[in-house]
Amino acid sequence: MRLTTKCLLAWCCLFLCVSGYGQPTPSVPRVFLLDGNHLQTTKQRLRANDAQLAPAWAKLAQEAKQALASELFSVTSKGVTPPSGDKHDYMSQAPYFWADPKSPNGLPYIRRDGERNPEINKISDHSTMDKMVAASETLALAYYFKGDEAYAAKATQLLRAWFLDATTRMNPNLEYAQGIPGINTGRGIGLIETRGLTHAVDTIGLLAGSKAWTAADQRGVQTWFGAFLKWMQESKNGREENAAKNNHGTYYDIQAVAFALFLNQHELAKSILETAKQKRIALQIEPDGRQPLELARTKAWSYSTGNLDGLMLLARLGENVGVDLWNYETKDGRSIRRALDYLIPFALGEKKWTDQQLGEWPPQMLASHLRRAAVKYQAPRYQALAEKLQSLTPSARIRLLEQGTVQR
């Protein structure tokens, strides 16, 4: 069949649209924890001036305007220097370790699980990174939904400062995370502090197509995350965290999968997720839904809900490569859903929590889990229970981010 020049141009345009090139922003953003299809629907509703989403958008827009005034965040701004002598290395102190009152100089520090030592605030890298992640995500969401390039430009500045700029960037390792004075300068456990970077790769996906975020930026951050993922897989600290049997292992997997997806290493991501069926779900959850390794902590409720949140995030990541962790169940009944069902009676006050929980015992911590489960399992009961524990305000950001439809 002979193709005219006009036909060839039409085919080229079609290819460019399908492949994602030549558009101001992709119709469905390349995100992994967030639901790209739902974000696209939200964008369409906002541009149609959907009144139901107006309060949530108004609050996000207000927060994005505040983020426009953010300083550039950097690991080099901390007031201490890591053992390497390089301020570009991330550094933090173990939160549950305190000076030994029986020791003349307080060393070595001793563990008081669940009690956060305020000394950790003297090293600012963890809080600085969390602020960078939060500000850049807010800006990128505002850009994606409304297309204001000012938001994309600021988000790009924040990301460049953290990952790319030679004077401010973080080195892609966690050799000095959660060190214990008098014992070590860093531990594998410190890897849990970079779990927020899984949101950073979604933020980058939201910026695709903006004038600010360039191909060089994309290559640069891919190189950074490639080096960081390699460090996670090969370093002593990374290997130790991968081997952790409790929530630390869960959050290691979340990071490894999210970063692998970002780097188009889909087979690696799929392998980790498949392994998680036995390595995380079957190992961590009992047939009745208890999570013994989290119940052993001094904040057993917080850690049980926290690890369940991690398993749900892992299940969300599995959707990207066709690995179903939501419905995975061992022969004796261990599953994500069973862990959720175990916690519900305690959140509702139908059963008394007899395991330790230092400080507050907030039942509403389970509300977000129930909302996700309501959609994934099409269970209206979960939605009703979530509302009972904590009603969503009209301005809640989650209304823009997550699908809430449950068939009744």
Image (cartoon, grey):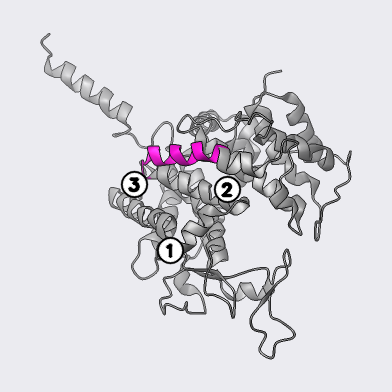
The secondary structure type at the circle numbered 2 is helix
**Residue shown at 47% from the left, 77% from the top:** 82
In the image, what residue type sits under mark 2? Thr
Observer-nearest of 221 and 45: 221
Observer-nearest of 224 and 404: 224
Quarter of the image with the N terminus is top left
The residues tagged by marks 3 and 2 sit, at their Cα atoms, a distance apart of: 36 Å
Which residue is the site of mark 3? 211
Magenta stretch, residue numbers? 263-277
The residues tagged by marks 3 and 1 sit, at their Cα atoms, a distance apart of: 30 Å
Earlier sequence position, callout 3 versus callout 1: 1
As drawn, is 139 to the left or to the right of 408? left
Q: Which mark is residue 173?
A: 1
The residues tagged by marks 1 and 2 sit, at their Cα atoms, a distance apart of: 19 Å
Quarter of the rendering containing residue 291: top right
Quick check: 36 above or below 181? above
